[in-house]
Amino acid sequence: MQSKPLVLKILDVVSIILLSISTYLALIYAPTELVMGNVQRVFYFHIGTAWTALLGFILAALFSVAYLITKDMKWDRLQVAAIEVSLVFFLITIVLGSIWARPAWNTWWTWDPRLTTAAVTELIYVAYFMLRQGIDEPEKRARFGAVYALVGGLSAPITFFAIRLFRTIHPVVIGGTNPAADGGFSMTPRMLTAFFFALFTFTIIFVDLFWNRIRLGDLQEKVEQLKLKVTM
Amino acid sequence: MFFQDTTPDTSGYMIAGFAIAFILMALYVASIYLRNRNLQQDMTLLEEMDKPAQPIEIPQPKKGPAKSTNNNKSAKPVTKKSRQ
């Protein structure tokens, strides 16, 4: 087994440092929002994880196209890695949104277009792993997975644009003019700093986890090949 | 919430939110670490199995009474008489 590359080790450490700084900015540096109080602070992590998760799902769809054209298993491993990390990040997004909604909307969950599309997206990718588990043949698994991830990738832009296309109570904080939205707020310069820093931090964390997950996929592949060699 | 005079205390929700976010991220990192460790153990084991078999060295018989290597204590000790 190859040891971890130095760049990845540095990225691991940088991710932890950035997460600590981002937490500080969200909890202490950014001012308290007057209407919602401290719960608004989860917004920074909510948006950070949502942005990277949706980006990851779209990346996975692009890797699917690459796999279907080249039939190279490398693209399959990249696709699995992107979807797995995005799934975790999107789960965090949904949980944080639900926690924010309880005091803001007086409910943990409502079947609003944004929340519904987000839940559907999460479930689509949970089903993706169930599909892969059910297929033994690696080539067939990769092909089915690629087609599924390509179609599933459509859910990411739909989720993103749901609050801009449909009448929804979910606030559009950046460039939002939706009169039906409930819980929106204007950001002060300090809030903007915390917001953009969180976006940057979660992008770096995503890259770090993605890279680690790719290495895990490569190792998995080597073990599978060695198993076949030993048993034959 | 939006027709109030004072800022509500929603710190409990904030703490819960951050705690869950950190726990989920930590669980995922731990899962990557554990899967990696297990695969490396499998890899080492499979590499051992994959190595070409080494010729077995047969130890030379020593003079004098041989020590019994039989772990079964209930079995009778092997003597010259019993061999005959």
Image (cartoon, grey):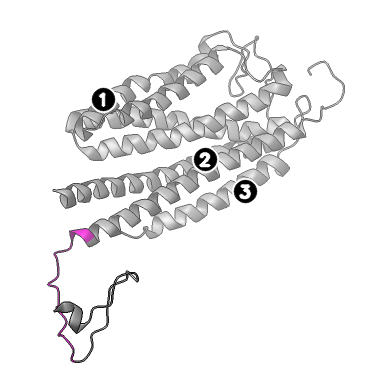
Is residue B14 or residue A30 the one in the foreground? B14
Q: Are marks 1 and 2 on the same chain?
A: yes
* Residue placed under numbered mark 3 in the picture: A21
Q: Are marks 3 and 2 in contact (CB under 8 Å)?
A: no
| Residue at x 16%, y 78% (from the top left corner) | B83
Q: Secondary structure at mark 2?
A: helix
Q: Do badges 3 and 2 share one subunit?
A: yes
Q: CA distance from mark 1 to mark 2?
A: 30 Å
Q: Residue A190, located in which quarter of the rendered image?
A: top right
Specify the subunit that label 3 lies on: A
A219 w.r.t. A193: above or below: below
Q: Quadrant of residue A210?
A: top left
Q: Amino acid at mark 3?
A: Ile
Quarter of the image with the N terminus of chain A in it: bottom left
Q: CA distance from mark 3 to mark 2?
A: 12 Å
Kind of residue at badge 1: Phe
Mark 1 lies on residue: A144
